[in-house]
Image: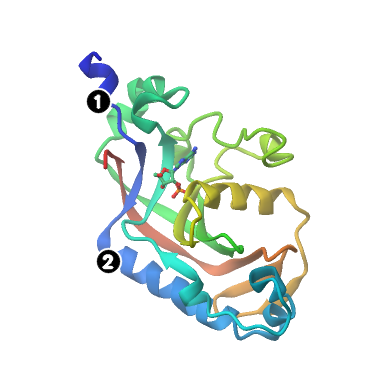
C-alpha cells in the first residue's frame, strides 16, 4: 500500500499531561470508593451484580486505564470513515502538538465503563469530527440530535471484557435520557441516577486538565 495510506494513526486525541493523569486517576478512585458505600447505590446494586444484597467493590470491578486521553477521531489506521480527510484538515495539522486545557465537568459510571465528561471550548470543537455523535439509531436512540462535542470524554476504566469504545456510547446514552433527580450531594458534586446502573456526578468545580493534541499509533 502507498505510504500515505499506512501512515494514519489508530486515533487522534488530546493526551493528558502526566501530573493531571495522576490527579484524575485519584479523583476517580475516591469517587468509586464512595459511590459503592452509598445507600442509593446499594439500592440498585443488582444493576452491577445481577442480584440484590450482593456487594461490589467498584475499584476492583473496573480495570483502570493508563495513558488517559480524549479521542477526537478514531482512524483505525485509515480504515475508519473520514480518517484521511480528518488527518488532512488544516486545523488538525496546525493544532498537532499543541497543548490546551480540557475541562472535565462530570464523572459517569455504568456497569460497563467509568469515564469523565469533557466540555470542549469553541476552539477545541474545531478538532471535533462532525459525525462523532451520529451513532446508528439502533445503537443509541436519539444520539444524532445531541450537540457536537456531547460524546467528548476520557475513559477511566472498563469492566472485564469491555472495549473502550463503549465509554462514549454510555455517555451518549446518558445524555439522551431525561435528567434524573439528584440522589446525593457529594463533596465533589451532585450525583444523579439514570436507571440500569447509570450514574453521573456533575462536578461542582470542573477539573482543568492540560492536554496535548496528538495521535496514537500503538
Ligand atoms: P475511548 O475514546 O472511549 O477511550 C483506541 O481503541 C481508542 O480509540 C480508545 O481510546 C477508544 O475509546 C477509541 N475508539 C475505539 N473505537 C472507536 C470507535 N469506533 N469510535 C470512536 N472511538 C473509538
Please say if 182 is above or below 36.
above
Horizontal and vertical percent position of residue 35: 59, 79
For marks 1 and 2 on the same chain, the one whose residue lies earlier in the sequence: 1
Residue at 54% in and 76% down: 188
**Ligand 1 under 8 Å from disc 1 Cβ:** no
- Mark 1, residue position: 7
The crowding category of the residue bearing disc 1, from other C-alpha atoms within 10 Å (few below 14, some 14 to 19, many at least 20), is few
Please say if 13 is above or below 119.
above
32 lies left or right of 9: right
136 lies left or right of 24: right
In the image, ligand 1 is in what quadrant?
Answer: top left
**Ligand 1 under 8 Å from disc 2 Cβ:** no
Residue at 77% in and 64% down: 180
Depth order, front residue of 139/22: 139
Residue at 63% in and 39% down: 147
Please say if 202 is above or below 78.
below
128 lies left or right of 92: right
Residue at 59% in and 73% down: 189
Please say if 209 is above or below 181.
above
Q: Secondary structure at mark 1?
A: loop
Q: Quadrant of residue 123?
A: top left
Q: Quadrant of the C terminus?
A: top left
**Callout count:** 2
The crowding category of the residue bearing disc 2, from other C-alpha atoms within 10 Å (few below 14, some 14 to 19, many at least 20), is few
- Mark 2, residue position: 19
Seen as rendered, the residue at the extreme top is 2
Amino acid at each position: 500500500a502507498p505510504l500515505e495510506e499506512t501512515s494514519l494513526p489508530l486515533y487522534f486525541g488530546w493526551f493528558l499531561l502526566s501530573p493531571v493523569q495522576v490527579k484524575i486517576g485519584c479523583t476517580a478512585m475516591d469517587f468509586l470508593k464512595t459511590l459503592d458505600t452509598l445507600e442509593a447505590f446499594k439500592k440498585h446494586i443488582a444493576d452491577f451484580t445481577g442480584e440484590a444484597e450482593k456487594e461490589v467493590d467498584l475499584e476492583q470491578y473496573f480495570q483502570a486505564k493508563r495513558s488517559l486521553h480524549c479521542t477526537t477521531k478514531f482512524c483505525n489506521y485509515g480504515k475508519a470513515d473520514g480518517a484521511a480527510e480528518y488527518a488532512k484538515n488544516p486545523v488538525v495539522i496546525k493544532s498537532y502538538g499543541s497543548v490546551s486545557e480540557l475541562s472535565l465537568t462530570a464523572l459517569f459510571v455504568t456497569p460497563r465503563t467509568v469515564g469523565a465528561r469533557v466540555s470542549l471550548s469553541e476552539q477545541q470543537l474545531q478538532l471535533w469530527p462532525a459525525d462523532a455523535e451520529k451513532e446508528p439509531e439502533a445503537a443509541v436512540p436519539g444520539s444524532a440530535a445531541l450537540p457536537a462535542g456531547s460524546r467528548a470524554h476520557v475513559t477511566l476504566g472498563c469492566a472485564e471484557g469491555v472495549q473502550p469504545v463503549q465509554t462514549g456510547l454510555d455517555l451518549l446514552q446518558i445524555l439522551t435520557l431525561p435528567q434524573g433527580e439528584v440522589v446525593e450531594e457529594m463533596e465533589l458534586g451532585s450525583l444523579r441516577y439514570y436507571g440500569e446502573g447509570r450514574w453521573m456526578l456533575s462536578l461542582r468545580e470542573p477539573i482543568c486538565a492540560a492536554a496535548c493534541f496528538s495521535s496514537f499509533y500503538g
